[in-house]
Amino acid sequence: MSHIHVPDGFIPPAWWVTGWILCAVVLFFLLRRLKGEDIRRRMPFVGVVSALMLITMNVPLGIIPLHLSLAVLCGILAGPALGFLAVFVVVLIMALFGHGGITVVGINTLILGSEAVLGCYIFHLLRRRIRKVSAAAAAVVLALLVSTALMIGVLSATVGAAEILPHDSHEATEGAENGSGEEEHDFWEELREVRYLLFTGWTALLALLSAGILLETLATVLIVQFFNRVRPDLMEGAHALS
Amino acid sequence: MHLASLDHMSNDGDSPLHRLQPGIKIWMAAFSVAGVVITGSVPRLAVYLLLLGLLTALSRNPARELLQLAVYPLFFSMLFALLQLQHSWSAALLVVFKAMAAAGTLILLISTTSYVDIFGCLSKYLPPLLMDAFVFTYRALFILLDQLQNLLRSIRLRGGYHPLKLALNLRSSAGMLGVLIIHAFDMSDRMYRIYALRGYRGCVPMSRNAKRPGLSEVIALAFSILILIGMVIPWPL
């Protein structure tokens, strides 16, 4: 859900260059650790998991201006390291299609990868204490909250908190014509202008984010329930912390 | 998903762009995207977009498919352009033109160069395990898309989809994804055994074009360097 569709040239170079460098460093350490027959055996599964994420991310959700990713589920099934690798593959391929700029691949990988990694760790922490379905739901909700916060944080820091909120373009045009475009836009004033369906302000923002988190959680929970009925061994063998 | 049509365009197309060496095309795309990202000039980006349109026409790929792909970056750039309208029209246009120029360049690259060739060139510089991930993703995507279409058809035939029953559709979709993931597990295991039989030890060998660049490659590369220089240097217009 937290895949940023920011086009190239919008985020300042210092940020996306840093994003790429951090992403490369993480991948470097991951790939150094990933060796052996077991990893080679699981590489086709990484490809398969990446393909699944690609397919899922291209499914439109109608009135909700977000898309599913199943990054947390893929992290649970593939493990945090291979899950992060799969996310990088997905984000780069999406950038080649024009879904998000090529320059923001580093930032997108770090944010979406954090979903996969955190989701895996939280799931394995909780699975011995509560039911697998509840553990998966909790993992998705918590991982998404963190990655959404990261996404909002990055966008706020790069383009300004007031800038990332949708607001009335008519007012924006009038402001530009009257030469008042130089004024600082107060974040709280802008937030009051946000509209989503019947909601405005904080409610609109929370409704939008909640809708995305709810859908992702629902999809993951239903899939995990399906596994429990049909192939419980898949969740038993879900790779932990490798 | 447009991957199947892009794959067809890049593998079966025939044009001067298709015939260029993959490595040269990747460098061309890199120089052009660098120019697009660095420049802050709307007129230069407009000129570049015109050039891109001409190159796309030269590639002889179906314009309708490529325009469909261009809708995504256009849509998302419009959202960010609306935010920039409060500054000026030119700031908003800059956002849209940059997005379209960068995305258009990459779409032109992948519609004239096959996925395998692109990652074959990149395999010189990237770790083998990462390249394996890209290769297996490419292979799995087509197989899973095929299975997905069959599953969707099965769901509709068995009454698992109704336009007005959201709960039913959600349960069916989740079951479908679940079946797809189960198939994916089994497929990945089979894939590993197939590759292991063929000598896979952690690095899928990829063929790379070892020919020296010809005149057309040199001209194309020089053209892209000129584009970069033209975009970046503040010529008085």
Image (cartoon, coloured by chain):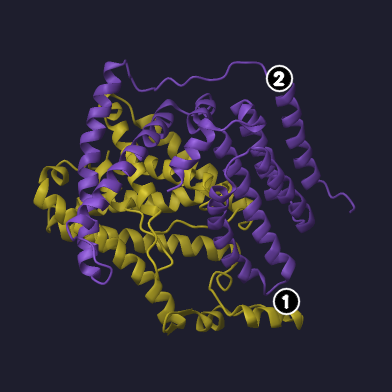
Chain colours: A yellow, B purple
| Whether residue A222 can be seen here | yes
Helix or strand or loop: what does disc 1 sit on? helix
Q: Which residue in the structure is indicated by mark 2?
A: B214
Q: Are marks 1 and 2 on the same chain?
A: no
In the picture as drawn, the residue positioned furthest to the front comes out as: B157
Q: Label 1: chain?
A: A
Q: Foreground: B59 or B108?
A: B59
> Which residue does the image show at 32% across and 53% down from the upper left?
A70
Residue type of the residue flagged with mark 1: Glu
Looking at the image, residue A16 lies above or below residue A62: above
Looking at the image, residue A125 lies above or below residue A65: above
> Which residue does the image show at 20% across and 61% down from the upper left?
B171
Residue A41 at x, y percent in the picture: 26, 28
- Marks 1 and 2: which is nearer the front? 2
Q: CA distance from mark 1 to mark 2?
A: 53 Å
Q: Quadrant of residue B57?
A: top right
